[in-house]
Amino acid sequence: MLRAPAHFCDGGRINPDRCTPCMPDFSNLGNQVLDGLPAEQRLALSDYLEVVMLKRGDLLAAKGHLVGHVYFPIDALASLFAGGEHEQRIEVISIGRKGLTAPNVVLGDTTALGDT
């Protein structure tokens, strides 16, 4: 899975002091959202992307909390859950290699809508 700090797409405000190492090959990242961007935009984002290895059940964002990173699945599936306690939650969306987590960040809303 690829991730980028939420600030990279928060209204265009980029903080270069918080950049993560770039990926060496950004021409085909494996996520359709990123791969669908023009090459120059992928290049501009490459400095903010990093590959992360996650385990099943890792919490990417907690409902009501600040979104720290936007994740772009490449070989994984992320789920957004709604509801209260763990036993009462329901999966409301699955996010795969055609999407991204926390799309609301693009509109400036950095609060997680549910547990991801």
Image: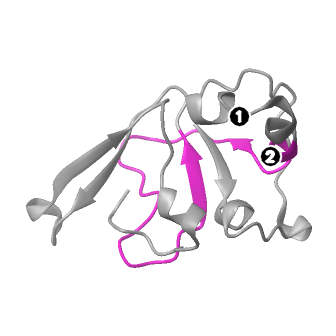
In depth, the one of 44 and 18 nearer the eye is: 44
Q: Dot 2: few (<14), some (14–19), or many (≥20) neighbours within 10 Å?
A: some
Work out whether mark 1 precedes mark 2 in sequence or the reverse, and give the earlier one: 1
Find residue 85 and report its horizontal and vertical position in percent: 15, 70
Left or right relative to 60: residue 116? left
| Residue on which disc 1 sits | 37
Which residues make up the magenta segment? 44-72
Look at the numbered discs 1 and 2 and tell me whether their residues touch, using CB distance below 8 Å. Answer: yes
**In this view, 60 is above or below 74:** below
The image quadrant that residue 11 belongs to is: bottom right
Find residue 82 and report its horizontal and vertical position in percent: 21, 63
**In this view, 4 is above or below 27:** below
Q: Which residue lies at the image location 45% right of the left edge and 31% below the top edge? A: 76
* SS at mark 1 in the image: loop
Q: Which residue lies at the image location 20% right of the left edge and 50% below the top edge? A: 91
| Residue on which disc 2 sits | 45
Find residue 53 and report its horizontal and vertical position in percent: 58, 38
Is residue 49 at least partly visible in the picture? Answer: yes
Q: Amino acid at mark 2?
A: Leu
Find residue 60 and report its horizontal and vertical position in percent: 47, 57
* SS at mark 2 in the image: helix
**The furthest residue to the right:** 16
Which secondary structure class fits the magenta region best? loop
Q: Amino acid at mark 1?
A: Leu
Cα–Cα gap, marks 1 and 2: 10 Å
The image quadrant that residue 63 belongs to is: bottom left
Q: Which residue lies at the image location 64% right of the left edge and 64% below the top edge? A: 6
**In this view, 28 is above or below 89:** above
Is residue 102 at least partly visible in the picture? Answer: no
* Quarter occupied by the C terminus: bottom left
The image quadrant that residue 113 belongs to is: bottom left
Q: Which residue lies at the image location 67% right of the left edge and 28% below the top edge? A: 35
